[in-house]
Image: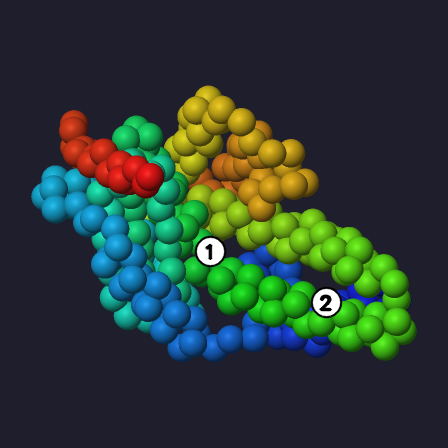
Amino acid sequence: MKKLVICAVVAQLILSACSTSSSGRKQIMLYSNDQLGKMGATSFEQMKQEIKISRDPATNQFVQCVADAITKNVPKSAHKGEWEVVVFDSPQINAFALPGGKIGVYTGILNVTEDQHQLAAIMGHEVGHVIEHHSNERLSSNQVAQGGLAIAGAALAIKGSKNKGLLLAGLGLGVQYGILMPYGRTHESEADIVGQDLMARSGFEPSAAIKLWQNMAKNSKSAPPEFMSTHPSNQTRIQDLTEHLPKARTYLVGTKTPSCKKPKYIPVSKPVAKPKTS
């Protein structure tokens, strides 16, 4: 039964693979660009309502400067129009890019990045996810995986298996660690390389991506084993970016470096404590 379900899932994946990534990897693409763009816009508007937005002029100017340089080199296949960039006033060390031309940067991550080049590495990575249509692929692979588990549940019910719940739980873990998590790690590694090339094309020093992850590694207190995580380990990322650096540097030749000066002080609001409940 497991073999039949795996075959069904694999068959669906193969039939749905109607696109190819820049690395030559087959992709599942069940959604249109318009659908993903609307989802991204809706999520972004919701975040703008729920998270405080930074109004500090110097901080916004710095982030916008880097974003302008990066987005000029994004293929039209990823986004044709203008990009909306918002700086969220939060200590969270994070940034993201969404389909539909949306970029969010948290002030917390600006105090981890040392200069414009390291911010470009982060932004290039996040926009890399959009360029490679990873949101579409993740939504599609989740949909296919859920379909496979539904088929398994129906088949086990017909067979009258006494261990149906246990078998489905085991199969669910197999899908998670065998398909979905590797997808996540593959996406992150792909975005690292695409982002490193993108930042170089935009005039930023691509070696800053390596330095950024070296800093991240120093600040990482703990992390799950790589096979149990949706992200590659810091050392894996550093190794991949170091190996790709000579090629990324070829895109930097003849490119003017943007003048985006990081402010000496970036204000970050402290998280608001939740009221205690009795």
From the top left corner, tell me how far across and down residue 185 is, in percent. 59, 47
Label at residue 34: none
For residue 131, above or below residue 205: below
Q: Residue at x 51, y 75 (%)?
A: 31
Q: Could you say where residue 187 lies in the image, as x and y percent from the top left?
A: 55, 52
Above or below residue 36? Residue 256 is above
Residue farthest toward the top in the current orientation of the protein: 218
**Sequence-wise first label, 2 or 1:** 1
Q: Please determine whether, in this image, residue 22 is positioned above or below residue 93.
A: below
Which residue is label 1 attached to?
Answer: 129
Q: Nearer the viewer, residue 27 or 1?
A: 1
110 up-or-down from 142: above or below: above
Residue 222 falls left or right of residue 107: right
Q: How dense is the environment of label 2, judged by Cα within 10 Å: few (below 14), some, or many (20 and up)?
A: many
Observer able to see residue 119: no
Quadrant of the drawing holding the N terminus:
bottom right
Q: CA distance from mark 2 to mark 1?
A: 27 Å
Residue placed most toward the observer, 2 or 59: 2
Would you say 143 lies left or right of 37 here?
right
The quadrant in which residue 85 appears is bottom left
196 or 220: which is nearer to us? 220
Q: Amino acid at mark 2?
A: Leu
According to the picture, the residue beneath numbered tag 2 turns out to be: 149
* Residue 200, quarter of the rendered image: top left
